[in-house]
Image (cartoon, rainbow, N blue to C red):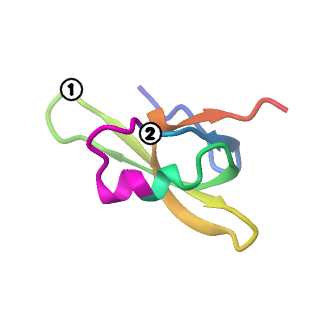
Amino acid sequence: MGPKYAIGQKVIIHPVSEKGLTQRESNVSAYAGQVGQISNFYSISPSAGQIFHIYKVRIGPEKKEIVVYEDEMDAKLS
């Protein structure tokens, strides 16, 4: 299955589950509710039949790039 989001698409970051937060999840949660733009994406396949898409998203006034998993964002519709 191909990536859900395309380069240049606007997305909204949504909060990560609060229990057992890793450092990376905690950093992503700081941007929850904010709109960003996909700047790049990568596909990884840790085992046969599994494909995960990882995205770089530019967010905030300083256009900081953060790494976001596909299930940590939704498409901005307008």
Marks 2 and 1, the one that precedes in the sequence: 2
- Residue 23 position within the rendered picture, expressed as x and y whole percent measured from the top left: 32, 59
Q: Residue at x 69, y 48 (%)?
A: 34
Is the N terminus in the top left, top right, bottom left or bottom right quadrant? top left
| Residue 20 painted magenta | yes
- Determine the residue located farthest toward the bottom in the rendered image: 62
| Left or right of 1, for residue 36 | right
Mark linked to residue 16 = 2
Is the C terminus in the top left, top right, bottom left or bottom right quadrant? top right
Write down the quadrant of residue 13 in the picture: top right
- Answer whether labels 2 and 1 touch (C-beta < 8 Å): no
Write down the quadrant of residue 5 in the picture: top right
Name the front one of labels 2 and 1.
2
Q: Residue at x 24, y 40 (%)?
A: 45
Q: Nearer the viewer, residue 44 or 14?
A: 14
Other residues around mark 1 within 10 Å, as few (<14) / some (14–19) / many (≥20): few
* Span of residues in magenta: 17-26
- Mark 1 lies on a secondary structure that is loop
Q: Which residue is mark 1?
A: 49
- Is residue 55 visible from the viewing direction of this image? no
Q: Amino acid at mark 2?
A: Val
| Residue 75 painted magenta | no
